[in-house]
Image (cartoon, coloured by chain):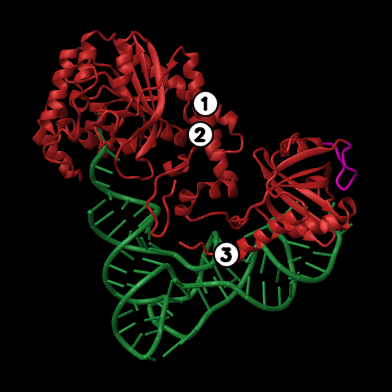
Chain colours: A red, B green
Amino acid sequence: MAEEISPLVRERREKAARLRAQGIEPYPWEFPGRVGSDEVVRATTGLAPGGAAAPTPMRVAGRLRAVRVHGKTAFLDLDDSAGSLQLFLRVDELGESPYARWLADLDPGDLVGADGAPLVTRRGEPSLLVRSITLLAKALAPPPEKFHGLKDPEERIRRRYVDLLSSPESRARFTARSLLTRELRRWLDGEGFLEVETPTLVPIASGAAAQPFRTRSNYLDRDLQLRIALELPLKRLLVGGLERVYEVGHVFRNEDLDSTHSPEFTMLEVYWAYHDYADMRALVERLYEHLAQRVAALLPDLAAAQEAPERFRPPFATVDYVQALEEASGLTGVLDKDRDALRDLARAVGARIPDDSPAGAFLDKLFGHYVEPTLERPTFVLDFPAATTPLAKRHRSRTGRVERFELFFRGIELANAYSELNDPDEQERRFMEQLSARGEDHFAYDADFIEALRFGMPPSTGLGIGVDRMVMALAGIPSIKDVILFLPTRERSGDGPVP
RNA sequence: GGGCCCGUAGCUCAGCCCGGUAGAGCAGGCGGCUCUUAACCGCAAGAUCAGGGGUUCGAAUCCCCUCGGGCCCGCCA
């Protein structure tokens, strides 16, 4: 396909060629010794507006966002990761010919370096009075409109680099995510947990019910799948004697993308030997309390982050699963109803899952309809009906229940934890029940996992947290599309593959 | 999977109801301006109106199909 040459791109290519003809390399190799724009701003404190420049020369580098030329004076806005800085160009500082040449050949979007002296303009703007400019990379493609940026949600996802380069808010969101996951790891490390990595490619995806992505190994000459959960490999590590482990990694579910679901997302799972789900609940509460405080400290400019410590102040509310469901729905005796009765009730509130789904699936539909939307403040839901959860241990004192909790916030699940089932025979029975209730598509039987349990898994508790949703909740970001850098998109006709 | 909505210049948008041959701002070009910060003033340029088909003397506008996207519902224990 022939590349169409936009007049805007042609103009920029000609500028690059002009610079080359003058012996200026448009893509140089290095620019040592620069400081952040914030350091220049700090160096202007105490300077009088319109007064003399500070004596110490400073060097900055970044992307040109705007150029305002006033005849023999010009103002250039430069963005870097520390913020932004106004460059102040004057013909009497640079000389007639360099001044004219730079203004002729620089464009918004170019990456440039500048040397000069900090000063404050008459209008009070901290600036760098420029003595020389260095082109660091010529931008051949024009950046989006300087004020509105990139609005089209499709383009923001397909070309995230354009979204990022034109939007400090977008950069702040993704920076928030990185700082929070770093903090998450640091906190778990401090609690004595060991980070591990387990395979993404597995023979059978298990540990949850979801459609897997399927692929194939030429070497092994067998079909493989992408994991849908981290649970079963991590429990094998408990069998192996690692007593506190966690993994942060991508899991893959071959399902639709919406504002709270992505086919590829980041899961945290934590396993803790010789502890139970009550211990895990205390840990989750402390974790969220800590992260909420950190997000406020790390992101002073993000209003939603500032509210996090108050929102996630312990103790979190607790409700009993069955009691909450019965109170919200007016139903009674939900634990004693059989599958057909639960199915009819779920059908009545609009659930459209297959008739042969396990009873627990219908209970979950009812819970999702009546209770979840009401859970606005952080709330632990305790002691799920056994039918809903094949991998959890039965409750030590409440019949028909398992030791499981979920944490909800604004109607969205933020954490899920159990006292883990470690009786190999009971685990085998629960797997078989799931299999007989539904097709093998929906829950894979992992024989090697049963075998692992036969060697003895200590009494343990395990936790799963969707990291993307955790970031959304703490930083107040409503769509998962704004916390995942690169999402898969459909191919556009005529286009090559999109990363 | 169902419903509703959207796609116009590199970017942000108007025009569409009610058909008459495409308009602005930013960015880019030329000219002016030594304190602006969404700088300003003037001039010129820039568009396969997502793609295809249909109706019509005439389609960005009405109809159909396709592609891409958004929102809601369903599904994702």
Work out whether residue A396 can be spotted: no
Q: Earlier in the sequence, mark 3 or mark 2?
A: 3
Asked if the stretch drawn in magenta spans residue A54, the answer is yes
Closer to the eye: label 3 or 2 = 3
How far across and how far down the image is residue A81, in percent? Answer: 64, 39
Q: What whole-number distance in Å separates the C-alpha atoms at marks 1 and 3?
A: 42 Å
What is the quadrant of residue A223 in the picture? Answer: top left
Q: Is residue A35 left or right of residue B45?
A: right
Vertical order, A237 against A60 (above or below):
above
Q: Are marks 3 and 2 in contact (CB under 8 Å)?
A: no
Q: Nearer the viewer, residue A416 or A489?
A: A489
How far across and how far down the image is residue B4, in percent? Answer: 32, 62
Q: Earlier in the sequence, mark 1 or mark 2?
A: 2
Q: Earlier in the sequence, mark 1 or mark 3?
A: 3
Segment colored magenta = A44-55
Residue at label 1? A182
Badge 3 density bin: few <14, some 14–19, many ≥20, Cα 10 Å: few
The C terminus of chain A: image quadrant? top left
Q: Which mark is residue A177?
A: 2
Q: Residue at x 38, y 53 (%)?
A: A491
Query: Which amino acid type corresponds to the residue marked 1 in the rendered image?
Result: Arg
The N terminus of chain A: image quadrant? bottom left
Q: Are marks 1 and 2 in contact (CB under 8 Å)?
A: no
Q: Residue at x 30, y 15 (%)?
A: A236
Residue at label 3? A6
Asked if the stretch drawn in magenta spans residue A87, the answer is no
